[in-house]
Amino acid sequence: MNPTVPPEAFEALKKIYDDVDQEIQASGVACWVRGLCCDFEKTDHVLYASSLEIAYVREIHPEPFEGGSCLCPFWKDGRCDERTRRPLGCRTYFCDEKYRDQLEAIYEKYYRQITEVATQYSLEWSYQPFVKVMRGD
Ligand code: SF4
């Protein structure tokens, strides 16, 4: 956890997430509701998140979740239980391959904006495997 994150930085991150969600919606990509994207036992996908994003989640989930699992602690019954604060990587990850380049471009654009918030508020910066960090592994 980064205890020095000011509320303004979280507000800026929230605004970025709102913009991401709007751009995703406008892109036309749709979730197929297969529940597979977060099934990290079956998919070969490691979700990374920046320290600012992790701090944003930690603000309301301060304690580490039980360790020893590759599954996201917010993945419940095949659905995400933390839609509001889920990281950029979750928001831009969809099964539909035909959107891959577009989603990568959206990811890169907003990743840059998140780094700029961290720079603006002189925050420590790292990029870490989200599940491991959440579980304190
Ligand atoms: S935060 Fe939600 S969307 Fe992201 S990996 Fe966890 S369950 Fe999936």
Image (cartoon, rainbow, N blue to C red):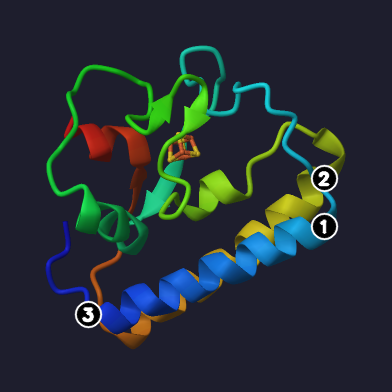
Q: Residue at coordinates 52% horizontally, 54% vertically from top-left?
A: 88
Is 102 left, or right, of 46 in this rendering?
right
Q: Is residue 113 left or right of residue 124?
A: right
Is ligand 1 less than 8 Å from the beta carbon at label 2? no
Is 106 placed above or below 86 here? below
Badge 1 element: helix
Question: Circles 2 and 3: CB distance less than 8 Å?
Answer: no
Q: Earlier in the sequence, mark 2 or mark 3?
A: 3
Residue identified by numbered label 3: 6
Q: Amino acid at mark 2?
A: Tyr
Residue under label 2, please give it. 99
Task: Please rate how many residues cluster around mark 2, counting C-alpha atoms within 10 Å: few if below 14, some from 14 to 19, many from 20.
Answer: some
Q: Are marks 1 and 2 in contact (CB under 8 Å)?
A: yes
User: Secondary structure under badge 2?
Assistant: helix
Q: Is residue 39 above or below residue 131?
A: above
Q: Position of residue 129 (x, y in %)?
A: 36, 39
Residue 118 appears in view: no
Amino acid on which disc 1 is placed: Ser
Residue ID at (53%, 48%): 89
User: Disc 3 marks which amino acid?
Assistant: Pro
**Quadrant location of the C terminus?**
top left
Q: Which residue is mark 1?
A: 27
Residue 102 shows in the view: yes
Identify the residue shown where x is 47% and y is 19%: 77
Name, please, the residue furthest toward the bottom: 120
Distance from disc 2 to disc 3, alpha carbons, whole Å, reads 35 Å
